[in-house]
Image (cartoon, rainbow, N blue to C red):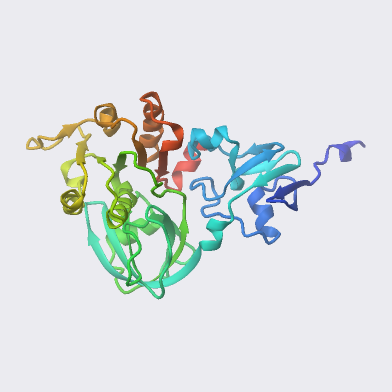
Amino acid sequence: MFSFLSKKKPTTAAINGLAITVQPKETLLQAALRQGIDFPHSCRVGGCAACKCKLVNGKVKELTESSYILSDADLDQGYILACQSVPTTDVTIEVDISAQQARRQVQGRVIGQERLTHDITQLRVQLDEALTYKAGQYANLSLATLPGVARSYSFATPMQPEAQVSFFVRKVPGGTFSSQINEQDVVGQAITVDGPLGDFWLRPTDAPLFLVAGGSGLAPILALLQDALASQSRRPVTLLFGARQARDLYALDQIQALERQWPAAFHFVPVLSADDIEPGWAGVRGMVIEHIPTHLPVGAQAYLCGPPVMIDAAVPLLKRLGVAPDHIFTDRFTTLHDPLSAAA
């Protein structure tokens, strides 16, 4: 008889001062998009942080563990993922809409497909029109032959004058998109590039650059360095690149070219982690994060890109070594499986 008293009521969310209604069990992102707000978003499953926003007032129920994708600094400042947050009270939200306003869908065609390693392929795309982005950001890619399938990849170069873009696609076991790129000829196919997305880009300062990349996470790191060189940066650079075996190292010629042209100190350290490394390897061995204390410059600004397990171990280590949280920038290369695993 009193069951109606327990029914949950809609809540109100004030997003940048604009009030909207959020239905029970509805996420902030769902409510915002339903009511016409151009809220930044990408994956919608808590794996990319594109919908990151600041909870100023009120309470939310988080559907997944946000610490998996948000930094400690973000969490300390009250940031949440709109796609994984269901309000339990009226809330006040602040979000940077400017990034979404710069986002566009641009059509193009695949013009190049080059094998970099046994499981990473470089994809080159000629866009129909130029797309403005910052080196380090990423985009969602959709092939016309895979309708309804979109995957996120970082730009591997800064903006090019001929409206060409490049991406490194690592084959994920069972991955629909990555398997097609790595196993089939897709040159000539129509492709949609949706972006830019993400807040991983080079912040202006004179601090030494400390860069850590794992696997295909080298893509945005190379873009950052190429852009910095073009901007005549004179910041000292230390680049750690983690891979399993020597066959997993790639783009070494690009890195050597950057080292030759860089107007300041440039220190490159490839690190191999496999137990069965080729006998001829005379370089550094072990997990890449194990070598951070040895090579971290004093007063460095750190940029990390690669698998979540690498970043989640490296960030607290950098803090213990004295790197300020606001000098640590990360880009986790997640797969669709990762957010589900983190939630479990």
Residue beneath the point at 36% across and 32% down: 314
Q: Quick one: 246 or 154, which is closer to the camera?
A: 154
Residue 307, percent from left and from top:
36, 41
Which picture quadrant has residue 32? bottom right
Q: Nearer the viewer, residue 209 or 41?
A: 209
**Is residue 277 rendered to the left or right of residue 291?**
left
| Front residue (pair 292, 234) | 234
State the count of labels: 0
Please identify the residue farthest to the left as the structure is shown.
Answer: 280
- Compared to residue 328, the image places residue 133 above or below, namely below
Q: Which of the pair 160/138 is nearer the observer? A: 160
User: Looking at the picture, how far across and down is residue 313, in whole percent?
Assistant: 38, 30
Residue lying at the far top of the rendered structure = 320
- Residue drawn at (26%, 68%) of the image: 112
Work out whether residue 306 can be spotted: no
- Quadrant housing the N terminus: top right
Q: Is residue 134 left or right of residue 246?
A: right
Say whether residue 151 is left or right of residue 289.
Answer: right
- Measuring from the top left, give residue 17's x and y in whole percent: 72, 51
Q: Hey, which residue is sitting farthest right in the picture? A: 1
Res 232 visible: yes
Describe residue 206's horizontal placement relative to residue 77 as left or right.
Answer: left
Residue drawn at x 38%, y 59% as measured from the top left: 177
Query: Residue 227: x and y, percent?
Result: 32, 56
